[in-house]
Image (tube, helix red, strand yellow):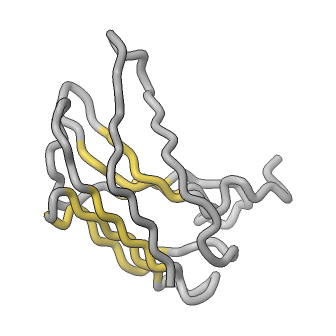
Amino acid sequence: MFEGRVNANGVTYSNLAGVNDLHRVNIATTWDITGDGMPDYTFWEPQTPTTVLDDQWYRVEWHVKWASSATANDGIIEWWVNGTLNGHYENVPFPAIRGFTEFQYAPTRQLIPPADEYLYIDHTRVSTP
């Protein structure tokens, strides 16, 4: 079904997870790590979560170091919220595609909100080597 489809191979995004106003930032990856040719969703949870509340600004910094080869499993995913390291993962497997191809804001919501909601974004910077 996914043969020849590359859209999900290499997609990495930050996610606002949690319920009942106990939100946290985690990272999701969507590539095949089981070897069955199908994209696998992996949610990298913070080891030290910062609680994210409504109606407040947060600074989210995120670093991804692609693995040195498709079989190396030496990639890194790490992120900070308001200067506090929330998650740090080493030995992350990455797909065979190379490089950074797209950056976007694509906020999604799993449940329908009870009222209008707004997302404000400021001072975005993307760096690649």
Left or right of 85, for residue 103 = right
**Looking at this view, is 56 or 44 the one in front?**
56
- Left or right: 8 in relation to 92: right
Q: In the image, what residue occupies the spot 57% across and 73% down?
A: 94
Q: Residue furthest top?
A: 114
The residue sitting at 42% across, 80% down in the picture is 91
Nearer to me, 99 or 119: 119
Residue 110 locus on image (x, y percent): 44, 27
The percent position of residue 112, horizontal first and vertical second, equals 42, 16
- Across and down, in percent, residue 97 comes to 69, 74
**Count of marks, rendered view:** 0
Identify which residue is drawn at 62% across, 76% down. Answer: 99
Looking at the image, residue 79 lies above or below residue 8: below
Which residue: 59% across, 54% down?
40
Q: Does 20 sit above or below residue 3?
A: above
User: Residue 18: where, in percent of width, then height?
Assistant: 27, 36
Q: Quadrant of residue 65?
A: bottom left
**Residue at the front extreme, as displayed:** 123
Please state if 23 lies on the left or on the right of 115 as rendered. Answer: left
Q: In the picture, residue 61 is in which quadrant?
A: bottom left
| Closer-to-camera residue (78/104) | 104
